[in-house]
Amino acid sequence: MLSWPKARIEICGPLGSGKTTLLNLLAHFGATPIYEPVQQHPYLEDFYSNPPKYALEKCCFFALDYLHSLKTHSAHEGTVALDASVPLLRAYHDMAPLRMDERLMADDLLDGIAAQLPPADLYIHLSADTQYLLKRIAKRGRDMEATVSADYVDGLNRRLDHHISRVATHSRLLALELQTLEGRTTPETIAPIIESIHKALSLALEAKASKAEQQALPLAEA
Amino acid sequence: MSRPAQRIEICGALGSGKTTLARLFSHMGAQVALEPVETHPFLADFYRDPPRYAFQCQSYFGLAYLKEARDAKGLLVMDNGLPLLHAYTDAGPMSMDEKEKANRLLADIGALAGPADLTIHLTGTPTQLLQRIAGRGREMEKTVSADFLADLNTRLAYRIAQLDPARVMALDIASLEGHTTPASITPVTERIERTLQHLALRRL
């Protein structure tokens, strides 16, 4: 079992990229998972019955729930891992059927939430091309996802790339090509990947500590 | 008979009788929207650790308010309102920064919901409110102080003062005391009904 320092990992990837699968595997190796609330989301049913009408409520609730999960785990001593993240929430907002005034509100809320939280210590970007994702989505056959189009997945992918590039500095980012994970669904086969995640997290924390030290120096001299 | 879509928001501190009054409108054929207390996903955490959870708790109340206000068809009566949501944010245990963000979100929500047709402001002194709060004996409300109620009252009055005065009706909670049945509340609801008709004409 690996030992996990106090830190936060966020797994970013479009739908069908295997975020939850990776989260389960990280949990198996000792990280603490925080899952998105797909079950008790109060607006999801309304949203699927009429997307343009309830997209705003759906988006805002996911954002609030993300903040809430992090606050409930803020005293946690180990590493928490999430399959939700600010870049992904932003990408979903960009793709949602919102009017301009609704978009303003959704973005105000996300900006307000992002400003209350430090960035994650490590962002894992699960990337794949659209055709590959569509195949995976079709394979798992969730009813809600039956109508997902190639344009939508493509748009989401691009927006996610953009938003990740804005928050994840080089030292905080681990990009994983989805194809390299293919077939690694057991603890034995995934172990090398988890070890590289663990290593990337240590390096990110070191980089953060040395940066904090450098920033503290001029003050100490003065 | 179909009536135009109109929205009444009932605002007042906790214990002022908002829910009781809102429920009495159902016999007028109104759709009554009550604050989500049982189903609120963050409320229990909020009472456990208010400063930590106030922001998302308040924001969720705002979101629930928006959904009800936008879903309205005929006459909608709410036991909540934008001025009250702002007042709770102003008086709540948040940092200045969080308050600013929560109030900004509420302003966005207000812009989307549009102004209420009528805001009923239930007024009562902290002493009157404390008596009623003790009377209903809710466990979660046991720690509410007179200072908090006085602060909330002041902030609510300030937020209400920013509305169009023609669309605000102030009711002293002492004057409603005992009027908890459809029959006994009729003089009050009739007065409100006349005001609404008047306001609907004014808007034409």
Image (cartoon, coloured by chain):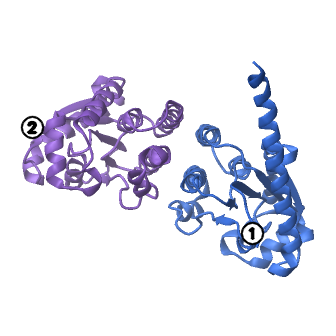
Chain colours: A blue, B purple
- Same chain, marks 1 and 2? no
Residue A113 left/right relative to A4: left
To which quarter of the image does residue A31 belong?
A: bottom right
x, y (%) of residue B57? 45, 48
Question: Which residue occupies the extreme front position in the image?
Answer: A221
Identified by mark 1, the residue type is Leu
Q: The C terminus of chain B appears in which quarter of the rendering?
A: top left
Question: How many numbered marks, from 0 up?
Answer: 2
Identified by mark 2, the residue type is Ser
Residue A203 left/right relative to B10: right
Which mark is on residue A26?
Answer: 1
Are there few (<14), some (14-19), or many (20+) residues within 10 Å of tag 2?
few
Q: Chain ID for label 1?
A: A
Q: Chain ID for label 2?
A: B
Q: Nearer the viewer, residue A155 or B139?
A: B139
Q: Nearer the viewer, residue A36 or B202?
A: A36
Q: Describe the element under mark 2 as helix, strand or loop.
A: helix
Give the spatial CA distance, label 1 vs label 2.
62 Å
Q: Describe the element under mark 1 as helix, strand or loop.
A: helix
Circles 1, 2 touching at the beta carbon (< 8 Å): no
Which mark is on residue B175?
Answer: 2
